[in-house]
Image: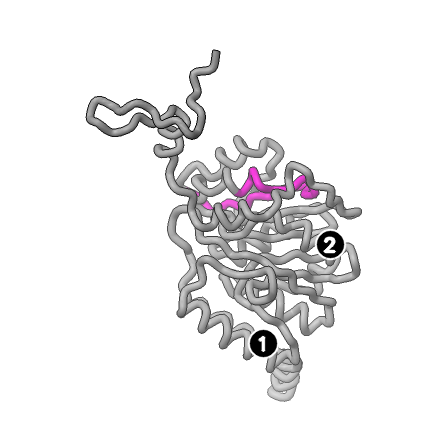
Amino acid sequence: MSTTLPPHVVPPPDHDGRPQRRAEDRALARRPQRRAEDRAVARRPMRRAGDGVASQHSVTLVVPAQNEARNIPWVFEQIPRCVDEVILVDGSSDDATVPMARHCLPTVRSVQQSGPGKGNALRTGFAAARGEYIVMMDADGSMWPGEIPHFLHFLDHGFDFVKGSRCIAGGGSLDLTKVRSFGNRALLAVVNRLYDAGLTDLCYGYCAFRRSFLDALDLRSSGFEIEAEMIAHALRSGLRIAEVPSLELPRRSGRSHLHAVSDGRRVLRTLITERPGARSSASASAEERR
């Protein structure tokens, strides 16, 4: 015989005069409130359980990480089944980032980056990738792996480079500060002017591309500016670029390695240096000096 009280029955008072809570009510009361980003993701259908999206090409996910042991479990459990290979690029972490990654995903390939900086980590991961498509995303939980099938859809339908955008319908950010927002808008205006483009977002590193175009991207940056370098070289090379809506979530724990002002300057310098015609003009000047 069930002892559960019907919903309309109030439990007898406790010794202190307050109504007793049912067991399930007490459990709910002890449960911490869900964070804003969890609620946002919960409103979207989880792609992993019933993922019917399958690309015709092999997919490698490259995840640079430094001291992200607390964030890795959430990120790795959200990776959809359409991903064939996961490469964790470790930046000499002091915590259990690598063991945690192997615990959550025994098939993960862990490689050590050869130098400092996010750019170096990504280039190391790209060089080790075996998939025909490469997807890059952060390990801090700010990017939802369940969006990966959207990126692959555009690669499957003729595009060469797909980037997430927080500024188109369906996208957004729960972590964009006023300083970062202003800097992103200013740098976006620069790239659209210098490269005759119509992008809606720039400083967001959720991207996917065909590995066959890795040489065309010609990546050399070592820091956060590598994301701008990728887009600049993709535009300059005439690659077919698509933007897909993406929701940026707050970092789940820890502190970001991004320095908005100094990294913004490096991005601006990269956009100006790599603009169409700049390198050829510099080479011609060098030849004249000889």
First-in-chain label (2 vs 1)? 2
Q: Is residue 253 magenta?
A: no
Name the amino acid, label 1.
Val
Q: Is residue 265 at least partly visible in the picture?
A: no
- Identify residue type, mark 2: His
The quadrant of the image that shows the C terminus is: bottom right
Inter-mark Cα distance, 2 to 1: 26 Å
Element type where label 2 sits in the image: helix
Q: Nearer the viewer, mark 2 or mark 1?
A: 2
Identity of the residue drawn at 56% across and 49% down: 144
Q: Can you name the residue that lies furthest to the top here?
A: 1
Residue sitting nearer the eye, 240 or 33: 33
What is the number of the mark on residue 153?
2
101 above or below 15? Answer: below
Closest to the observer, 236 or 141? 141
Image position of 128 (left or right of 203): right
What span is in magenta?
75-93
Q: Quadrant of residue 8?
A: top left
Q: Is residue 77 magenta?
A: yes
- In the rendered structure, find residue 191 and report the number of the disc placed on it: 1
In the displayed structure image, the side of residue 181 where residue 274 appears, left or right:
right
Along the horizontal axis of the image, is 213 left or right of 272? right
Q: Nearer the viewer, residue 58 or 162?
A: 162
